[in-house]
Image (tube, rainbow, N blue to C red):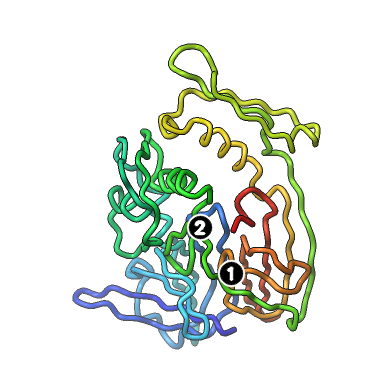
Amino acid sequence: MSFVLILDVAYEEEIVRYRFESSLGFVFEKALYLPYTQFSGTFIGQVEAPFEAAQVQCVTAEYRSRIVHYGMPDKIVVKQEKSHYKVTVTSRSYTMLLAQNEPYPRINTNVTLQSLCQRNLVCDRISYEDPTPQVGNIYVREHSTVWDAAVAYCIKASGRYPYISGCNTVMMTVGDRRNVDISGKVLLERGSEAQSGRILSDVYMKELDDDYPFEAHDTSAASMGIVRTRYYPLDMQWLYDPQVGLQHKLDISNRAAKVKSCSYLGYLGEDLMDTVTGGGMSGKRINSIRVKGSSEGVITTLKAYDDRYGQRS
């Protein structure tokens, strides 16, 4: 199926790498608004299993010798059968740690995307777009995550939402992305989706007393007849830019409100924010990728979000 599973297995004094090229099925996924890539599947090894599940340290997925996923072994199952053994894996990339760690609550001054995240999480398996603009004040509130801080930074610095490029690189800008031409591929389906259940129309933020002097309104919600109002306490994360913070609440409520999608036979190694030619999605930026391998072959499903962040250049 052209996807290869690689496991780093720890023994007492060394790490041994095992490759699995025979698969019963797999799924590889990544999307805007998710701080990680995900890979799952069942692969077959020959004769007897040389390791136990608990010995697996890292999970890598390759496509034509290019690493598309590198992450933690969320769940590993090893089963021995008569003539072979099966390894079933579920793994999320190391950028998931950004959403699993609480930063030290404080004001972070004069930070870039890289310095902000590395100040609050040390992991040499995560990389960041560099350089990015220096932002004066990013407040990290209690019980938020490093990913929350990264989102606040990116919105303040550029008005864009961060995304995962490659395996474990956090990006903010689009830059020179690929154009992926699927017009010559076997198109299996194409379609559109719409959902309005999250869209907010009016948002307000409180000041130190009982007043709500900061407000933002979504005219597109009003034109759809949607009335959803939210009142927020003073959010220290947006203390220096309350209007930017409120606009972000409106924008994120619109995430994936309108979607175009297509599925084709094969896989071309797309990445998030690449543009598409063909499949009824020409000119759109890719915001979701799902690659499924089975006995029927490899099928790729692409989605483009027509929202506030997905198609922003």
Of residue 40 and residue 197, the one placed in the foreground of this image is: 197
Name the residue that disc number 1 marks.
27
152 versus 233 height, above or below: below
Q: Position of residue 88 (x, y in %)?
A: 50, 70
- Residue shown at the point (55%, 52%) measured from the top left: 33
- Secondary structure beneath dot 2 equals strand
- Residue shown at the point (57%, 65%) measured from the top left: 272
Given the current orientation, which residue lies at the most extreme top position? 210
Badge 2: how crowded within 10 Å, few (<14), some, or many (20+)?
many
Mark 1–mark 2 Cα distance, whole angstroms, equals: 20 Å
Name the residue that disc number 2 marks.
163
127 versus 226 height, above or below: below
Quadrant of the rendered structure where residue 135 is?
Answer: top left
Q: Position of residue 205 (x, y in %)?
A: 53, 24
User: Do tag 1 and tag 2 residues touch (Cβ < 8 Å)?
Assistant: no
Which of disc 2 and disc 1 is earlier in sequence? Answer: 1
Quadrant of the rendered structure where residue 273 is?
Answer: bottom right
Badge 1: how crowded within 10 Å, few (<14), some, or many (20+)?
some
- Secondary structure beneath dot 1 equals strand
| Total numbered circles | 2
Q: Amino acid at mark 2?
A: Tyr
Q: Amino acid at mark 1?
A: Val
Given the current orientation, which residue lies at the most extreme left position? 13
Going by the image, does 218 lie left or right of 139?
Answer: right
**Residue 56: which numbered mark, if any?**
none
Q: Position of residue 93 (x, y in %)?
A: 44, 63
- Residue shown at the point (48%, 56%) measured from the top left: 172
Which quadrant, please, contains the C terminus?
A: bottom right
Going by the image, does 309 lie left or right of 188?
Answer: left
Going by the image, does 8 lie left or right of 219?
Answer: left
Q: Position of residue 277 (x, y in %)?
A: 71, 74
